[in-house]
Image (tube, rainbow, N blue to C red):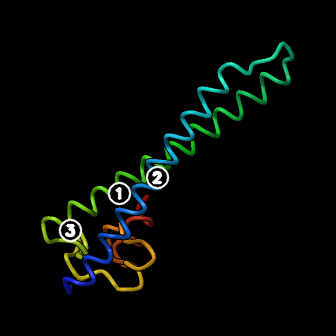
């Protein structure tokens, strides 16, 4: 892959990484603020509990995505970015544009999903 394209992907990944870190920090702060918002009403406590669960799910998803981005940045550093980790073929340009942190070509991804 061209060095210029790789640098563009690296920039996108670093920007997305910063967004995720900011989002995770904000979500954690919201969760801490909610700990003090329990009311005497059982319905209020149930709503607070649900809100906390949703925040937890958001953070978990963001952390997973952050791990994928960090792995993609590592692949850029070691020269394997854009190469499928299963078949070692080049990942399609459209797929990388949509998901620059992807590890698999579309064929290997589909095979993986079928085997789940």
Q: Position of residue 104 (x, y in %)?
A: 32, 71
Residue that appears at 38% across and 70% down = 12
Q: Secondary structure at mark 3?
A: helix
Residue that appears at 12% across and 65% down = 78
Q: Position of residue 9 (x, y in %)?
A: 32, 74
Query: Is 61 placed left or right of 46 in the picture?
Result: left
Q: Across the whole image, how many numbered discs are drawn on residues?
A: 3
Q: Secondary structure at mark 1?
A: helix
Could you tell which of marks 1 and 2 lies nearer the N-terminus?
Answer: 2
Instruction: Determine whether 45 is above or below 81 in the image.
Output: above
Instruction: Determine whether 3 is above or below 60 in the image.
Output: below
Near mark 3 (Cα within 10 A), the count class, few <14, some 14-19 or many ≥20, is: some
The answer to whether the residues at label 1 and label 3 have Cβ atoms under 8 Å apart is: no
The answer to whether the residues at label 1 and label 2 have Cβ atoms under 8 Å apart is: no
Residue 76 numbered tag: 3
Residue at numbered disc 1: 68
Residue at numbered disc 2: 20
Could you tell which of marks 1 and 3 lies nearer the N-terminus?
Answer: 1
């Amino acid at each position: 892959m061209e060095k210029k394209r790789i640098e563009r992907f690296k920039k996108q990944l670093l920007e997305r990484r910063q967004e995720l870190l900011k989002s995770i920090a904000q979500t954690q702060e919201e969760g801490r603020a909610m700990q003090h918002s329990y009311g005497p009403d059982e319905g209020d406590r149930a709503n607070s509990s649900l809100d906390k669960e949703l925040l937890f799910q958001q953070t978990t998803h963001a952390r997973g995505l952050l791990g994928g981005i960090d792995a993609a940045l590592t692949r850029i550093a070691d020269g394997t970015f854009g190469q499928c980790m299963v078949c070692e073929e080049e990942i399609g340009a459209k797929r990388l544009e949509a998901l620059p942190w992807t590890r698999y070509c579309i064929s290997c991804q589909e095979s993986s999903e079928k085997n789940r």
